[in-house]
Image (cartoon, rainbow, N blue to C red):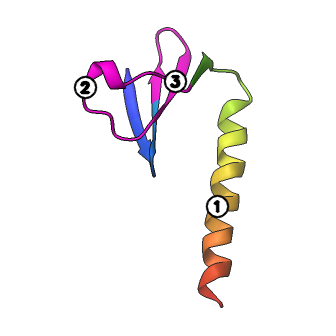
């Protein structure tokens, strides 16, 4: 299992099971690491996440111009 932190959300990705979970905050103890949402990884998810990432980057860049 791999974990990726994005702001206040931790993405847990299980390559073997092809699943993911979104966990709020930086919970240190297992009892606090309850997923807000979990599901199966689909073919479209990589593209969808890249689109989201690009939009967030563009928003940040537009904000620098102000």
Are the two marked residues, 2 and 1, in contact with CB atoms closer than 8 angstroms? no
Residue 57: % across, % down: 61, 65
- Give x and y (percent) for residue 24: 46, 36
Residue on which the image places disc 2? 29
The stretch of residues the image draws in magenta is: 12-36
Distance between mark 2 and mark 3 Cα atoms: 16 Å
- In the image, residue 51 sits, relative to residue 26, either above or below, namely below
**Residue depicted at 32% across the width and 34% down the height:** 27
Q: Which residue is mark 1?
A: 56
Horizontal relation, residue 29 to residue 3: left or right: left
Is residue 46 placed above or below 1 in the rendered structure?
below
Q: Is residue 46 magenta?
A: no
- Which tag is nearer the camera, tag 2 or tag 1? 2
Callout 1 crowding tier (Cα within 10 Å): few <14, some 14–19, many ≥20 = few
The residue to which callout 3 is attached is: 21
Residues at marks 2 and 3 touching, judged by CB atoms closer than 8 Å: no
Label 3 neighbour load within 10 Å: few <14, some 14-19, many 20+: many
Element type at mark 1: helix
The quarter of the rendered structure image containing the N terminus is: top left
Q: Is residue 22 left or right of residue 57?
A: left
Q: Residues within 10 Å of mark 2 (few under 14, many from 20)?
A: few
């Amino acid at each position: 299992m791999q974990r990726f932190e994005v702001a206040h959300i931790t993405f847990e990705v299980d390559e073997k099971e092809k699943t993911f979970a979104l966990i709020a905050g930086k919970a240190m103890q297992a009892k606090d690491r309850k997923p807000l949402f979990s599901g199966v990884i689909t073919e479209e998810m990589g593209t969808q996440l890249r689109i989201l990432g690009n939009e967030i980057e563009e928003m940040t860049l537009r904000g620098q111009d102000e």
